[in-house]
Amino acid sequence: MDDTKEKNSSLTFLFSAVYFLSYFTRYTYAAVLAELIVNLDVTKSQAGIAQTGFFFVYGVAQIFAGILGDKHQPKNVILFGLLGTSVVNVTMCFMTDIYVMAAVWMVNGFFQSMFWPPLVRLVNHSFKGKKYNKVITIISQACNVGTVCIYLCAAGLISFSSWRIVFAVSGGLGLLFASIWFLCTRKLLLDNSPVPASGQDVPETERRLNFKTLARLGALPVFAAIVINGALRDGVSSWLTTYLNESFDFGTSFSIMSGAVIPIFGVLCLTVAAIFISRIRNELRLASIFYMFASGMALLLVFFFRRSVPVDIVLFALIAGSMHGTNLIIIADFPHYFARYGKISTFSGILNAFVYLGSAVSIYGIARLAETFGWKVTFIVWVCIAIVAAVCCFLSSLHWTEIEKGQDSPPPPQKADP
């Protein structure tokens, strides 16, 4: 019994650590974005190309990573991602041209996609029932801790040296942990006891998760909502430092350090979401409430526009933090209901692809909106899209009984129709 508890604790720590490292090496560019704009003398739109390209590649590659996570050993897929993202970060510290940097950072999007879908499958294989929900929440918290650390690390290193050393440190830590992951997974996830193929114990007629099935379950509006989740979460997080630097004429080090506030609030919102997930049966209705909260915070940004630095920072943080809570509900918990189809990694990858489609559009879109119409109009757009997402989640929540069962309430057809 003690051995089982010790192994479970070790696996939880290991899974959380690898997700921590994925975010530490993912948000390096975002953390130094304000410094890059000043140091390389580029516009917000030019600097945003790398982020847009990253999220676009990341989103598309999520589908590929999800399929890999279902067909191959997920621990090896994660190791591949760790090694790749570490090398890319080290390479970035030698770059001088913003467009070359954008191309290299897009490659990082591919390697970063190798973390979440196979990790969901590993957690689903290692933990069952309520334990799964608890562990997946802990892992999700690790991403915010990783984001806090990279922002604080970036602020300190930039004041001491330059933005280049931030990439070097991030890549070095990634390479170090890749060796730790390799050694620990050999011990905790024995090579002679591979994770069984996803859905192996599910009848073939029940494995068909496709567009028609999702339409019958009323799950399609969730895809629209999750695009908006990515747009608000990563768009708000990426541009806070630049907004503060432009609006209040702070130095970049202070602005970057302020960016650490967002993931701190993300931890709080994830905790709140986890508490309500365990108590509210209809999780999509809970997601709808989170979106309405984000809309309200964006509306307050319009009214308190540039009146107070602390108020602006907190409102930005609450918008992004509520999106982290929504992300836990939809990306981490929602795929669990589709495990019976044997496509948990694939479905998680597809959902995450839609998240980062929104991220890709928002990084460049917010820059253009802010440059063309100003930040106030940008905040009004945030209010509107958050309301749209809330409506989408509410519409899907009306089908919750069918989603929970993983099938329609009417009897299934006798033939294997999807």
Image (cartoon, rainbow, N blue to C red):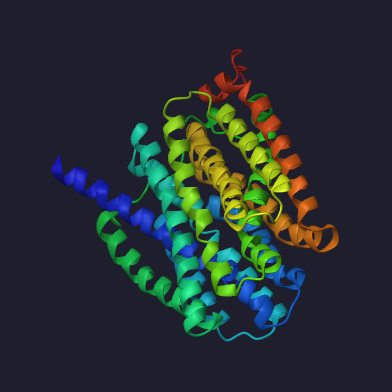
Q: Is residue 161 above or below residue 399?
A: below
Give the farthest residue toward the right: 372
Residue 310, image x, y percentages:
57, 55
* Quadrant that contains the N terminus: top left
Q: Is residue 188 visible?
A: yes
Residue 409, image x, y percentages:
59, 15
Q: Nearer the viewer, residue 89 or 387?
A: 387
Q: Residue at x 54, y 75 (%)?
A: 88
Q: Nearer the viewer, residue 384 or 220?
A: 384
Tell me if 311 is positioned left or right of 345 in this view. Answer: right
Q: Nearer the viewer, residue 104 or 268?
A: 268
Q: Residue at x 69, y 37 (%)?
A: 389
Q: How many marks?
A: 0
Tell me if 154 is positioned left or right of 418 in this view. Answer: left
Tell me if 99 is positioned left or right of 186 in this view. Answer: right
Residue 69, image x, y percentages:
49, 52
Q: Is residue 234 above or below residue 326?
A: below
Give the farthest residue toward the top: 410
Q: Is residue 417 visible?
A: no
* Quadrant that contains the C terminus: top right
